[in-house]
Structures are given as C-alpha cells and as structure tokens.
Image (tube, helix red, strand yellow):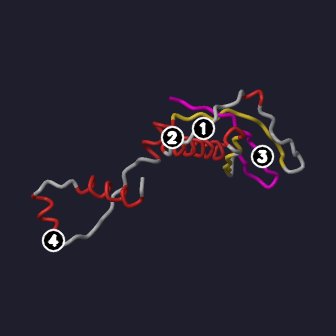
Amino acid sequence: MISAYPACFYKEKSGGYSVIFPDLNHLATCGDTLDHALAMAVDCLAGYLYTAARDGEKVPGPSAIGSIQPDQEYDAYEEVFVSLVAVDVAEYAKTHFEKAVKKTLTIPKWLNERAEREGVNFSQLLQAALRQKLGV
C-alpha cells in the first residue's frame, strides 16, 4: 500500500535542500541536490512510518496538499515548494530495513556438533535470543 504525505522543499541559499513533513511533527531531512533530497525524503518517510507501525504508534493522516503553507522566509531560502512524497513502506522495508545481514561467530566445536545433530537453526536461534535480549 502506498503512503503519500506532503513535504515542504526548501532550496537553501548555501546549496542543497531541506525537506520538512508538517503532518509528522515536522520530521525533516535534507539532500545536496533536488534528486538527493527527494530520495532522502522517501527514505525518511518510509523509516518513520515503518518504525511507527512496528512500535504500534498512531500516525496522523496526511493533509491535503493545498492546505500546506510552507514557511515563506525567503531571506533564508531561494525557493520553497510543496510536493507529495510517496512510498510503498512494505516494499521499501524489504530492501532497506529488513534485509538480512551475514554475521560470523565463534562457538566451541563440541557445541556446534551437538547443535547440528539436533537440527538447530543457528540463524533463527540467534534472532530469537537477540529479540529477547533487546526486548523487541
């Protein structure tokens, strides 16, 4: 499911862009170029929505894009505009947040042999132990 929120893009006089999501407690990110700022906005939005869903937090719905009035401090910015930022959070999470990483570990040989005889899945066991240890 695609989620879309309006974001204010501020072109900085010193270069680069700042991006603010007014509906999400002024969640902010930035980028060196407009393309980079847009990519960072997608990542920022996906991360926020993913974390909120994982933690069971309520997220406000998006405002209508026409109702967003960006801060018009033109002495600080060259240009300001509002644009929708959209992301499929579940798809984005698969490649950015939930991607498996390989870890190398060392255990005693006798323990390894016994675990293998009993069909222990080392990855599942380590994940379960880490979740318990971290309370997640």
Q: Are marks 3 and 4 in contact (CB under 8 Å)?
A: no
In space, the residues marked 3 and 1 are separated at their CA atoms by 27 Å
Spatial distance from mark 4 to mark 1, Cα to Cα?
49 Å
- Magenta span: helix, strand or loop, mainly? strand
Q: Secondary structure at mark 2?
A: helix
Q: Which residue in the protein does label 2 denote?
A: 53
Secondary structure at badge 1 equals loop
Q: CA distance from mark 1 to mark 2?
A: 8 Å
Magenta-tinted stretch: 1-19
C-alpha gap between disc 3 and disc 4:
59 Å
Q: Amino acid at mark 1?
A: Val
Which residue is rendered at x = 74% and y = 40% of the image?
Answer: 8
Give the amino acid at mark 3. Lys
Return the residue at label 4: 109
* Residue where numbered disc 3 is placed: 11
Numbered disc in front, either 3 or 4: 4
Mark 3 and mark 2: Cα distance apart in space: 31 Å
